[in-house]
């Protein structure tokens, strides 16, 4: 008996192989379901620091954890905060440092900037939407749904007892699902078994 004589069994085998190849390629070059970024801002050099998570081609959940802060404010914005720089300067705030990372596979831009000036103006300017985070064991944590039309902006005021503010920013893509590697391997193995069994059963009837 020739191996996998029927077109159906060959199709199942080819599908199993293609699935494994697609998963391997996706793991190396495909869309990432999550990304994270760490940044520190010297407390003595700034009056506050701002962290921004801006999805560019995906939607998901953004989380910002801050250590070394005495107060953390956060708000959603529907525009790129970079476009608000003239208004920020008008409030007496100057951006002194900017750290930017772009993750094309996750579809997100993450920014962390140091500000000089009084951050209370930010709260006054956006008093209708700004919120205050509460610390847990010295760590402020903010989690919010974000999209290309709604970014997460977090403003942190340094503590008098901390030398730096440490930011941990993470972004998890939602809105679609994808097979895990284990699920793909299991499905591929099942397709191979079905292909062999189908071929054996069909061959026994001929």
Image (cartoon, rainbow, N blue to C red):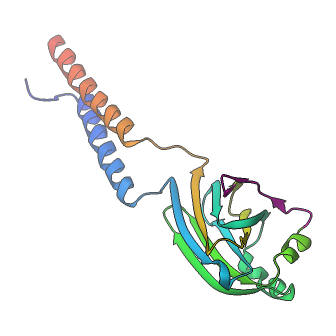
The residue sitting at 71% across, 70% down in the picture is 159
On-image quarter of the N terminus: top left
Along the horizontal axis of the image, is 182 left or right of 156? left
The residue sitting at 39% across, 61% down in the picture is 29
How many numbered tags mark residues here? Answer: 0
Q: Let me know if residue 2 is in the magenta part.
A: no
- Determine if residue 153 is in view: no
Task: Please name whichever residue, 95 or 61, is drawn nearer the observer in this view of the structure.
Answer: 95
Q: Residue 105 location in percent, x, y?
A: 48, 63
Along the horizontal axis of the image, is 18 left or right of 133? left
Q: Residue 63 location in percent, x, y?
A: 64, 56
Q: Which residues are magenta?
A: 127-141
Q: Let me know if residue 131 is in the magenta part.
A: yes
Q: Is residue 59 above or below residue 13?
A: below
Along the horizontal axis of the image, is 180 left or right of 175? left
Q: Residue 169 location in percent, x, y?
A: 59, 62
Q: Residue 60 location in percent, x, y?
A: 63, 53
Q: Is residue 179 above or below residue 49?
A: above
Q: Quadrant of residue 188?
A: top left
Task: Please name whichever residue, 35 or 33, is drawn nearer the observer in this view of the structure.
Answer: 35
Residue situated furthest front in the rendering: 161
């Amino acid at each position: 008996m020739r191996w996998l004589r029927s077109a159906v069994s060959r199709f199942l085998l080819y599908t199993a192989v293609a699935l494994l190849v697609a998963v391997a390629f996706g793991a190396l070059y495909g869309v990432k379901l999550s990304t994270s970024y760490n940044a520190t801002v010297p407390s003595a050099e700034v009056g506050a620091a701002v962290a921004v998570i801006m999805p560019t081609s995906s939607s998901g959940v953004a989380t910002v954890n801050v250590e070394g802060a005495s107060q953390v404010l956060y708000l959603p914005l529907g525009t790129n905060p970079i476009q608000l720089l003239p208004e920020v300067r008008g409030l007496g705030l100057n951006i002194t440092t900017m750290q930017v990372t772009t993750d094309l596979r996750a579809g997100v831009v993450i920014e962390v900037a140091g500000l000089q000036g009084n951050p209370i103006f930010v709260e006054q300017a956006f008093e209708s939407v700004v919120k205050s985070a509460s610390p847990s064991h010295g760590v402020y944590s903010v989690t919010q749904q974000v999209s290309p039309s709604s970014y997460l902006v977090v403003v942190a005021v340094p503590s008098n007892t901390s030398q730096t503010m440490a930011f941990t920013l993470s972004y998890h893509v939602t809105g679609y699902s994808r097979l895990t590697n284990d699920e793909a391997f299991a499905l591929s193995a099942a397709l191979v078994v079905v292909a062999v069994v189908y071929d054996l059963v069909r061959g026994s009837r001929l």
